[in-house]
Image (spheres, rainbow, N blue to C red):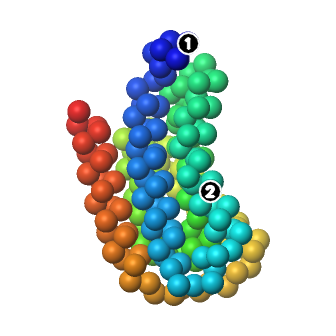
Amino acid sequence: MGNESAKKMHVIARVNYKLRMMAIYGLSVLFTTSMWGQERLYTAETAITLITALLWPHVLYFTLFLREDSYEGELQNLVIDGFVAGMAAVICSFDPWFVLCAAGTLIINTVVNGGLILTAKVLLFALITAASLQLYFQNGWEYVSNPYSIVFGSIQMMAYWTFIGKTTHT
């Protein structure tokens, strides 16, 4: 059954699984470093966000086995990725490097796989999620500059762009 399921899985779904893991794990490190040395790093919201992020690629990939059309399912998963990015942006108080890296990851992945209309949907979904959660929690805008997020943000962007370039080139 494992071999038959792998044949039915669309190539975009298989490739995006690897890309999503690379992006999520890199963004998780950046997410954590953006709050380094602050008490909010040790909150339940942060723990839930990190656990969700670490399980996210695997859950999405394995749900595609249940779908008849794994390509359409993967396009829907890209939209849902916007929700996770919007949620994390609020939790880390819109750290500019995190937001830049998360938006860059969403943009390149959706442009390559679904075009500009899907990209607009994903970014809109991420913005609506972030704005809704910000209003719901009413946590005031608080930006704490952190040099770690600059370093890890730069590393994450370069690593992800290199990885997606290598993956799409071969």
Q: Note whether residue 164 is visible.
A: yes
- Residue at (45%, 68%) from the top-left corner? 30
Q: Is residue 60 above or below residue 36?
A: above
Residue 132 in which image quadrant: bottom right
Residue 92 lies left or right of residue 7; in this view the side is right
Residue beneath disc 1: 1
Q: Secondary structure at mark 2?
A: helix
Assess whether mark 1 and mark 2 are in contact (beta carbons under 8 angstroms): no
In the image, 23 versus 42, the foreground residue is 42
- Mark 2–mark 1 Cα distance, whole angstroms, equals 29 Å
Residue beneath disc 2: 51
Q: Position of residue 96 (x, y in %)?
A: 45, 75
Q: Position of residue 49 (x, y in %)?
A: 63, 61
Residue furthest toward the right? 136
Label ID, residue 10: none
Q: Quarter of the image containing the C terminus?
A: top left
Q: Amino acid at mark 2?
A: Ile
In the image, 49 versus 70, the foreground residue is 49
Q: Position of residue 91 (x, y in %)?
A: 62, 71
In the image, 160 versus 117, the foreground residue is 160
Q: Is residue 83 above or below residue 63?
A: below
- Residue at (51%, 70%) from the top-left corner? 32
Residue 138 lies left or right of residue 94; in this view the side is right
Residue 38 in which image quadrant: bottom right
Among the two numbered marks 2 and 1 on one chain, the one whose residue lies closer to the N terminus: 1
Q: Residues within 10 Å of mark 2 (few under 14, many from 20)?
A: few
Q: Note whether residue 131 is visible.
A: no
- Residue at (56%, 68%) from the top-left corner? 89
Q: Amino acid at mark 1?
A: Met
Q: Position of residue 55 (x, y in %)?
A: 59, 47
In the image, 63 versus 111, the foreground residue is 63
